[in-house]
Amino acid sequence: MSELSNLIIRRGQLKGQLTRIANYIRDNEKNPDIDQIKVRLEKTKETWLDFQQVQLQIEEEGETPDESEKYRNGFEQLYYDNVAKCNKIIRAASPSVISNFPSDRTSNESASNEINSHPNIHPVQSAMKLAAIEIPRFTGVYTEWAAFYDIYTALIHDNKSMCDIQKFFYLRSCLGGDAEKVIQCLQTTAENYQAAWKSLTTRYDNKRVLIQVHVKALFDLEPVKKRIVGAFTCTN
């Protein structure tokens, strides 16, 4: 059996784990055992990390971008559903504890307020300079990753004057679409920033997939070129 076949089997096993967790949550949602829900929430997150690694290997072995994207979307949706339902059940059981965590959908304005009001966060010395340079919003389009990565890394990720919680708020404010979904289930904490950044780079900084996407774009341009040439010929 080929390496690709083994990886696809492993990927299917990981999806099976998430499906079993989803079934457990559905069957016990009305009368949940909170400890069991917490265990399955952690298992869901572990399975997600395992999937990221396996999926990257599958893409490197030659799976097409369209096939990879289709499977990723299905797996991600199952993952997000599990995490959201677990968090909802846990919040209902202990609202006072959960409410102390910042929302994963923090707006830019509330993010700035949080940074400025946090007693352990030093002011961003380069905030005025950052405002003058617009960081492109990244929505998960592979062809836009390189530009976003270079600018964000230079201005935010490698900025020594910023702490991780500040970087996390900036990161969230720069993401949208599928890219935002990659980290939406991570709480906005200093400890989670590196995990969030790693999840993004694992997903999008994939040289093989980037090359395939660019090659596909070139082939897609060829029919357009022929139509333009044909139209020009007819007018003459």
Image (cartoon, rainbow, N blue to C red):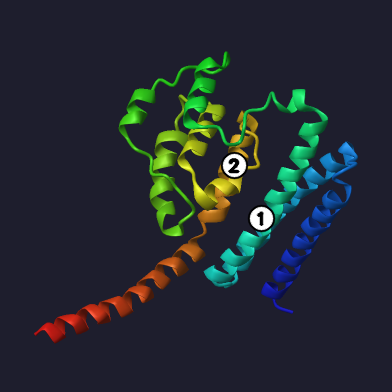
**Residue drawn at (45%, 56%) of the image:** 141
Q: Is residue 92 above or below residue 137?
A: above
Q: Secondary structure at mark 2?
A: helix
Q: Is residue 218 above or below residue 188?
A: below
Q: Earlier in the sequence, mark 2 or mark 1?
A: 1
**Residue drawn at (15%, 80%) of the image:** 232
User: Viewed as shown, does residue 24 lie left or right of 131?
Assistant: right
List the single residue furthest toward the left: 236
- The spot of residue 52 in percent (x, y) is 65, 56
Q: Nearer the viewer, residue 32 or 64?
A: 32
Q: Is residue 83 above or below residue 118?
A: below
User: Viewed as shown, does residue 204 lie left or right of 155?
Assistant: right
Res 99 → quadrant: top right
**Residue drawn at (50%, 38%) of the image:** 171
- The spot of residue 162 in percent (x, y) is 48, 26
Q: Secondary structure at mark 1?
A: helix
Q: Nearer the viewer, residue 97 or 164?
A: 97
Q: Which residue is mark 1?
A: 77
Q: CA distance from mark 2 to mark 1?
A: 18 Å
Identify the amino acid type marked 1: Gln
- The spot of residue 158 in percent (x, y) is 46, 35
Quadrant in which the N terminus appears: bottom right
Q: Nearer the viewer, residue 141 or 80?
A: 80
Q: Which residue is mark 2?
A: 196
Res 185 → quadrant: top right
Q: Around disc 1, counting alpha carbons within 10 Å, would you say few (fewer than 14), some (14 to 19), or many (20 or more)? A: few
